[in-house]
Amino acid sequence: MKFTGTSNYVATQDLMLSVNAAITLQRPLLVKGEPGTGKTMLAEEVSEALGMPLLQWHIKSTTKAQQGLYEYDAVSRLRDSQLSDVDGGERVKDINNYIIKGVLWQAFTADQPVALLIDEIDKADIEFPNDLLREIDRMEFYCYETRQLIQAKHRPLVFITSNNEKELPDAFLRRCFFH
């Protein structure tokens, strides 16, 4: 797998070297720059050029790292249990019906290698990047509600973009290859 640019995206030699180094080293590629400079488009073009589906996670100021893994919808389960028949309802008995898989879960369990874009990571709380360190390093996480260890079938090609609005933690930066 090697990225050589596309007809829609003219990449510099340094940028192509960074992308290919991240692929070879199997480390996330952190791309920093001003808004509108093509950071998101890079992930789109690389995934297309390499024939990989692209999963996107656009970060907002209110985004929590847990949302990228999964969310447990306890409120819906409680509502369903109150509204179900006298026998308790079959849907309520299976907690998996109330687990909402996040983009990292989807990337880890995909049947083929995927590209994963974590877009504008610097918009989130300062602890957000550190909250993802273990999962991105080990390519696994534990779902406590279902008592499952979710492990990556294939290591996704991870792109992380930053508009340089906030400084990112050093521990996080050490785990990324950046351009």
Image: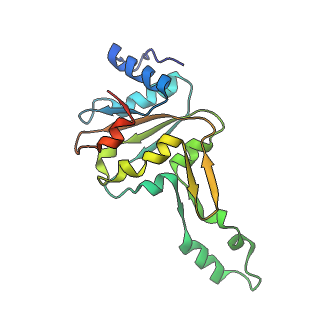
Q: Is residue 120 visible?
A: no
Q: In this image, 135 relative to 35: left or right?
A: right
Q: Residue furthest right?
A: 87
Residue at position x 65%, y 79% in the image: 81
Vertical position of residue 40 compared to residue 17: above or below: below
Residue 62 on image: x %, y %: 34, 58
Q: Does residue 150 appear left or right of residue 138 in this picture? A: right
Q: Quadrant of the C terminus?
A: top left
Residue 156, percent from left and from top: 53, 35
Q: Can you say whether 29 is above or below 70 in the image?
A: above
Q: Nearer the viewer, residue 143 or 64?
A: 143
Residue 65 location (% of width, % of height): 42, 54
Q: Nearer the viewer, residue 175 or 21?
A: 175
Judge by depth and name the residue closer to the eye, 77 or 26.
Answer: 26
Would you identify the image quadrant in which residue 35 lies?
top left
Q: Residue at x 63, y 83 (%)?
A: 82
Identify which residue, 133 or 52, lies in the foreground: 133
Residue that sits furthest to the bottom in the current view? 86
